Amino acid sequence: MLIIDENKCTGCQKCIKVCPSEGALVIKGKVVEVDLNRCTLCSACVSICPVDAMQIKRKAKTADTSAYADVWVFAELDGEKLKPVVAELLGKGRELAENLKQNLAAVVLGRSLEIDKCLDKLAAQGADKIYTVADEIFADYSTDAYTYALSSLINRHKPEILLFGATHLGRDLAPAVAANLGLGLTADCTGLSINEEGLLLQTRPAFGGNVMADIICPNTRPQMATVRPNVMEALAPEPERTAEIISEKVKIEEDIVRTEILESFFSDDGHEIGIEEAEIIITGGRGLASKDDFSLLEELADALGGIVGCSRPIVEKGWMPKSRQVGQSGKTVSPKLYITCGVSGAIQHKVGIRNSDIIIAINKDENAPIFELADLAVVGDLYEIVPELIKVIKSKT
Ligand SMILES: Cc1cc2nc3c(=O)[nH]c(=O)nc-3n(C[C@H](O)[C@H](O)[C@H](O)COP(=O)(O)OP(=O)(O)OC[C@H]3O[C@@H](n4cnc5c(N)ncnc54)[C@H](O)[C@@H]3O)c2cc1C
């Protein structure tokens, strides 16, 4: 809540000029007054006030934590399939649930046909319960409909923990639910565990990856986190496992959806899938002499059916978009095949590729650290090796 000290306010109106919410601050007599229904607590006025007359008091909402139980995983659908990160979340969710001696549940929103197709997989990957809400309104993602449905389920069933993949959708939905219900949220976690007090310890890189921050949300429930894809380990599926299916009804009026999808198009790098989901990645580093030389890697990627990634300096030079950066401050990947060309193998790059099945490194320096991780080390000039590789692959296909 914004509190204005009438004794300090001089009526200078500097706060009114910077306030982005029209009518939230008005001059009444000689002092400024606030309309609390319009104020968004942005604190622009607090910063500008020359006499410290304004103060924002935020009260943490404390939940009756004993009423909350179970670990939930938001099971994001991609058409008729589950996003790969869902299996990873269920793997980590199982560990957390067992630690807390609670159930692990998956929550899936979609159309009946899509939901039916994923139930067995969710059970096989570790879910004890599966909450479903089937509605045609979920055919296309909308923040409003998904937030409304998920918030309703949370209010009904009171989960203790709720995990989302840090996908495009998860990064949109999780904060919307958190804001809607007044909850805490930790974004882009790379580690999750239960601490001695039974709270979810959420670890994520902060300050550009220079420190790892451990975060807890002691006051609100559920404790919510988005989790980086390809970091947690999925359990081996157990096809004979079964789960309790709980079909929920949530009445969603169409007019709560404030957006209309006019056109869908691919992300800034022109690829249908993100680099986190690619099965073959060809990554270029500072060993490439120019932006144009990345066409050589594109040619190799096309020949193999993969996509091109890069190290951080390449993004800093503006040669590739940030969405293609692999590593600690970029994307964590887990492809079947990862080929590096002119990448030295700094620790910040290596942490992002550890889960790759096979790594082939091409580097002209035989002592390059990337070779410590590589399954196949190719010592030589990428400008000689890559064209030869393309020739061989093309001759075989
Ligand atoms: C907080 C923090 C976060 C970071 N996050 C990331 C991250 O997410 N991802 C990331 O990649 N980096 C990250 N970095 C940067 C990282 O430390 C390295 O600086 C970076 O990975 C080096 O990129 P590179 O391997 O392309 O370049 P270099 O280290 O310069 O290596 C170039 C390599 O190319 C080889 N080479 C040169 N010419 C040829 C040729 N013709 N043929 C074959 N080989 C050749 C050289 O022998 C050399 O080994 C981060 C750094 C910090 C401090």
Image: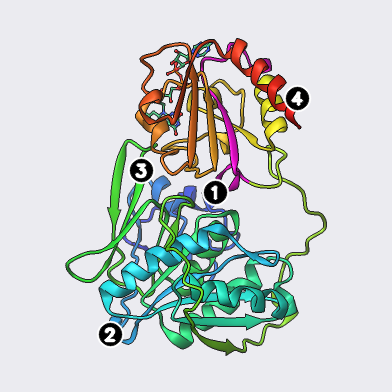
User: How much space separates mark 3 and mark 2, taking CA atoms?
Assistant: 31 Å
- Amino acid at the residue labelled 1: Lys
Instruction: Specify whether residue 283 is painted magenta.
Output: yes
Q: Is mark 3 within 8 Å of ligand 1?
A: no
- From the viewer's side, name the closer residue of 255 and 215: 215
Q: Quadrant of the C terminus?
A: top right
Of the two numbered discs 3 and 2 on the same chain, state the one appearing first in sequence.
Answer: 2
Label 3, secondary structure: give it. strand
- Amino acid at the residue labelled 2: Ser
> Ligand 1 is located in which of the four quadrants?
top left
The correct choice, above or below, for 229 with respect to 131 in the image is: above
Q: Residues within 10 Å of mark 4 (few under 14, many from 20)?
A: few
The correct choice, above or below, for 238 with respect to 373 in the image is: below
What range of the chain is rendered magenta?
274-293
Q: Which residue is mark 4?
A: 395
Label 4, secondary structure: give it. helix
Q: Which residue is mark 1?
A: 17
User: How much space separates mark 1 and mark 2, taking CA atoms?
Assistant: 46 Å
User: How much space separates mark 1 and mark 4, taking CA atoms?
Assistant: 68 Å
**Is 201 placed left or right of 131 in the picture?**
left
Q: Residues within 10 Å of mark 2 (few under 14, many from 20)?
A: few
Q: Farthest residue toward the left? A: 196
| Quarter of image, res 302 | top right
Of the two numbered discs 2 and 4 on the same chain, state the one appearing first in sequence.
Answer: 2
Q: Is mark 4 within 8 Å of ligand 1?
A: no
Of the two numbered discs 1 and 4 on the same chain, state the one appearing first in sequence.
Answer: 1
Q: Which residue is mark 2?
A: 66
Q: Quadrant of the N terminus?
A: bottom left
Q: Which residue is mark 3?
A: 206
